[in-house]
Amino acid sequence: MASNLVPVMSVDELKTFFVEAFPQSLSQPGEAPLIEAIEPGLVRIRRKVGDAHLRPGGTVSGPTMMAMADHAMYAVILAHIGPVALAVTTNLNINFLRKPGLSDLIAEGRLLKLGKRLAVGEVSIFSEGEEDEPVAHVTSTYSIPPNR
């Protein structure tokens, strides 16, 4: 894990940024993941799971988990560099490990390396109440614009 990381944004500051930068997310209440915690090198978010997130077979859809992982990675980066709206995903790789329950999903995004132009991290996604075994594991790289 990246060492000496100190968050520069609080949970409330990060929430405010997402509301201001992505007002379209307000049009669908409950759709945006909830930021629960920011720690050095880590952000934890929650997604309330509802019918819109399910696929046939009664499980949470892959796109729901991929979007959550991308959100967690974006959040952990911004929590440590500040509100840089133009940081973008350059790679996201997901491994689905087991069928998630129908409870809320919890994602923990961790920074592995935070450089001037690239950030590399991983995200573990869990079903609430089953945090001992992840349902998905993600690695991701983000491009950070110059002159942030």
Image (cartoon, rainbow, N blue to C red):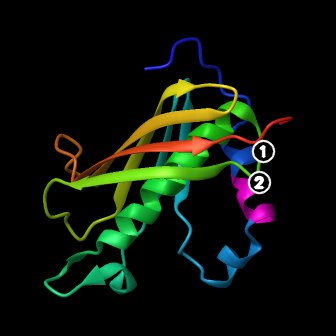
103 relative position to 4: left or right: left
Identify the main secondary structure in magenta: helix
The residue drawn where x is 29% and y is 75% is: 61
Residue under circle 1? 83
Q: Position of residue 72 (x, y in %)?
A: 50, 49
Classify the position of the N terminus by image quarter: top left
**From the viewer's perspective, is residue 130 above or below residue 100?**
above
Q: Amino acid at mark 2?
A: Phe
| Element assignment for label 2 | helix
Q: Nearer the viewer, mark 2 or mark 1?
A: 1
Q: Position of residue 4 (x, y in %)?
A: 58, 11
Q: Position of residue 146 (x, y in %)?
A: 80, 36
**From the viewer's perspective, is residue 65 above or below residue 51?**
above
Residues at circles 2 and 1 in contact by the CB criterion of under 8 Å: yes
Which residue is most to the top?
4
Crowding at mark 2 (Cα within 10 Å: few <14, some 14-19, many 20+): some
120 relative position to 13: left or right: left
Residue 36 visible, this orientation = no
Residue 96 visible, this orientation = yes
How many marks overall?
2
**From the viewer's perspective, is residue 79 above or below residue 36?**
above
The residue drawn where x is 17% and y is 44% is: 133
Q: Nearer the viewer, residue 6 or 146?
A: 146
Crowding at mark 1 (Cα within 10 Å: few <14, some 14-19, many 20+): some
Residue under circle 2? 17
What is the span of residues highlighted in magenta in the rendered image?
Answer: 15-21
Classify the position of the C terminus by image quarter: top right
133 relative position to 126: left or right: left
The residue drawn where x is 39% and y is 85% is: 52
Measured in 3D between alpha carbons, the distance from the residue under mark 2 to the one under mark 1, in whole angstroms, is 7 Å
The residue drawn where x is 42% and y is 52% is: 92
Residue 51 on the magenta segment: no
